[in-house]
Image: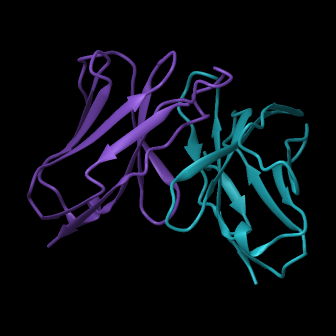
Amino acid sequence: EDKVVQSPLSLVVHEGDTVTLNCSYEVTNFRSLLWYKQEKKAPTFLFMLTSSGIEKKSGRLSSILDKKELFSILNITATQTGDSAVYLCAPPANAGGTSYGKLTFGQGTILTVHP
Amino acid sequence: NAGVMQNPRHLVRRRGQEARLRCSPMKGHSHVYWYRQLPEEGLKFMVYLQKENIIDESGMPKERFSAEFPKEGPSILRIQQVVRGDSAAYFCASSATLNTEAFFGQGTRLTVV
């Protein structure tokens, strides 16, 4: 059975801090890993990582994948209160091996950014 | 381009009633996925559909739950004879192809009283 573990489970920081969120996984026939942000509603897509060692960036957010060590990190620099959310990592589930939309979500990291 | 549209946003049902949750995928998307998020738990995959076909229903409870994605119209997740344990947020997602990211709707919050 595919397994995804995120750490820390929760994190409280002040605006301007930099945070690193971790995601480790055990997935048969791994193909990619996706990061989502969830703010009390729909998860919003952030990144899809397929290749090891290649950083993806979007503004203050960046993410990288290590296929050898089976983990990914999500970095947020100069955090803002609007970054407060649950951050989810999710590799596509292998069972059926069919689609990137069938995801095995980790339990998430709850990030709280105080002013 | 409107995103994934789910309705209703909130649904209250008494025990034993039926719940119907609707999902219209993004324009051009033919792959639809349903997820359930129980209180204090993570998102769990339920079912994956393409037009008129159920591709993978490995996450669906064996009884009372069904899903369809007809040729015309939205995808429907149907829960018969609801029980209190069905209270959850139900999210729908869609993708354009097998190998592209899925985008989520705002969810339907089902409360069974």
Q: Is residue A57 in sight in this rendering?
A: no
Q: Residue at x 84, y 82 (%)?
A: B14
Give the colour of chain A.
purple
In screen coordinates, is A90 left or right of B77?
A: left
User: Picture quarter containing residue B65?
Assistant: bottom right
* Res B75 seen here: yes
Quarter containing the N terminus of chain B? top right
* Residue B43 spot, x, y in % from top left: 55, 51
Position in image of residue A3 (x %, y %): 46, 35
Residue sticking out furthest to the front: A1
Q: Residue furthest left?
A: A16
Residue at 90%, 63% in the rendered image: B80
Please tell me which residue is depicted at 88% across the width and 57% down the height of the picture: B64
Is B29 on the left or on the right of A39, as rendered? right
Is B91 placed above or below B113 here?
above
Q: Position of residue B81 (x, y in %)?
A: 90, 69
Tell which chain the image draws in cyan. Answer: B
